Image: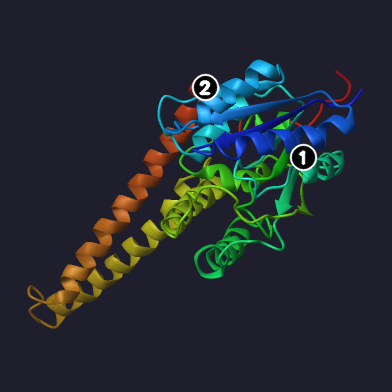
Amino acid sequence: MSESVSIVIPVYEEHESIPHLYGSIKEAMEPLGRSYEIVFVDDGSRDRTLAVLEEIQKKDARVVVVSFRRNFGQTAAMAAGIEYAEGDVIVTMDADLQNDPADIPRLLEKIKDYDIVSGWRKDRKDPFLTRRLPSVVANWLISRVTGVYLHDYGCTLKAYRKEVIKNVRLYGEMHRFIPAIASWVGATITEVETTHHPRRFGSSKYGLSRTVRVLLDLITVKFLQSFSTRPIHAFGPPGLALGAIGFLISLYLSFEKIFLGQDIGGRPLLLLAILLIILGVQLFIMGLLGEMLARVYHESQGKPVFTVKKVLGR
C-alpha cells in the first residue's frame, strides 16, 4: 500500500495564486493514485486569501485550512501545517507558484530511500543581487557551519518522512534549517533539482533584512547542534582561557610591585587583568547554569539524549 502524502503550504496574501496552485497540485498528484491531502495555513492574510481557501475546501474534502488570528511568520505556519498533517510523507512548498507541483512526484520517488529530500532551484528565477547572491553566500555558510551540505537551504519544496519531521520543533525562522536539525538524529538527506518559476502575482515577502536573521539563527543552530547537552564545553574553555590569561598578568604585575617596587595602580594592564578574570568567571558560571538548565529540560520532560532507529529481538 502506498504511503499517504500531506502537502503543507504556508500562505500569506496569495489569493491570486491559490486557485492555480491548487489545480496544479491536483494535476500532479491524481495520476499517482496515492492518498493525499493539502494543508493550507493562512498566516493572518488581510486580503481575500482565507475566503478563496474556504471556497476550495467546501468543494474538496482533501483540503485542510488552518487560519491564524494574525501574522506569525513562515516558520510558525510551517510548524502548524506539519502538526495538522496526517500523511506518512509531508511535502512543504511555497504558495507563490515559484515552486512547481510537477516536481512533487520526483521527491516522493526519491524519499523511498531517504528521510528528507530537499529541492534545489538550480536555475533560479530571482533577481541576482537581492535574492540569488545572498542565498549563495547563506547556503555556503550554513553548509560549512552545520556540516550538512545542500545547495539550496532556502527552497521550501522539500519532502520529509513523518517520523522525522514530527519530532523537529521549530522556533524563530528555523524552517530553513530543518535538514540540519534533523541530521542531529541521524536523518538521511539528499537533493533533487527542481523547477523554479518567476513570480506571477503579488510581490515577494523576502528581503535583504532576512540575512541578519539567518545569521543569528545559524548561531543558534550551531550551538544547539554541538552543545545542547553539554553547554559547559561551549563556555568553559574560553572562560578558563580568559581567566588564566588574567591570572598570569596579575602574577606579572604582582612581581613588579613586590620585587621591583614599581607602581601598578594606574596601569591599564591591571585593569585588563581584572577584566579578563571577571569575564572568565562569568563565562564559567554561564556554562554551569547551562548545564543545570539542560538537565532540568531533559529530566523534567523525559527528553532522551539519544534517538533509536529500531529495536530487534523485543
Amino acid type at circle 2 is Gln
Up/down of 171 relative to 234, above or below: above
Residue 7, percent across and down? 70, 32
Label 2 Cα crowd, 10 Å radius (few <14 / some 14-19 / many 20+): few
Up/down of 109 relative to 211, above or below: above
Q: Quadrant of residue 137?
A: bottom right
Between 38 and 47, the one lying in front of the other is: 47
Amino acid type at circle 1 is Asp
Tell me which label, 2 or 1, sits earlier in the chain.
1
Between 81 and 60, the one lying in front of the other is: 60
- Per the image, the residue denoted by label 1 is 115
**Disc 2 element:** loop
Residue drawn at point x = 87 percent, y = 41 percent: 109
Left or right of 238: which side holds 139? right
Residue 288, percent across and down? 39, 42
Residue drawn at point x = 60 percent, y = 61 percent: 139
